[in-house]
Image (cartoon, rainbow, N blue to C red):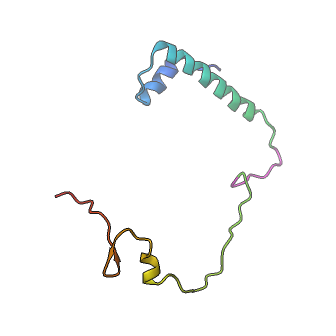
Amino acid sequence: MPITLDEVRHVARLARLELTEDELRAFQTELDALLGHFQDLQAVDVTGVAPKPHAVALQNVLAEDVARFGLTRDQALANAPKSRAGLFLVPSIRED
């Protein structure tokens, strides 16, 4: 069942799109093709195929949670453009 030009206008209005008649006809063609692909998918026999929650097999890769020493304050501040009293100095973003 092809999509009508009125249906395309309705969808465009819902999406608050101002489309020309040429654009409406172009979208009508594209939407017809898209709906045709969905009809092709509906015709596929999936009897006996178990549903999958995801298209690709997922596996969590977890690292061991081990406490370890991090950077010292001096190492952390070594590449900072500005620092004072062991703290990072950053530009103010507050307007006066």
- Which residue does the image show at 51% across and 18% down from the upper left? 24
What is the x, y in percent for residue 38? 68, 32
Q: Which residues are magenta?
A: 47-54
Q: Quadrant of the C terminus?
A: bottom left
Task: Assess whether residue 49 is covered by the magenta stretch.
Answer: yes
Q: Nearer the viewer, residue 72 or 49?
A: 72
Please check the rendered image and state whether residue 42 is part of the magenta-colored stretch, yes or no: no
Q: Is residue 84 left or right of residue 42?
A: left
Residue closer to the observer: 4 or 47: 4
Considering the whole magenta stretch, tell me its main secondary structure.
loop
Q: Position of residue 76 (x, y in %)?
A: 45, 77
State the image coordinates of residue 30 (x, y, percent, origin top left): 61, 23
Query: Is 95 displayed left or right of 79 in the figure?
Result: left
- For the N terminus, the image quarter is top right
**Residue at image coords 56%, 18%:** 26
The spot of residue 37 in percent (x, y) is: 70, 29
Asked if 45 appears above or below 77 in the picture, the reply is: above
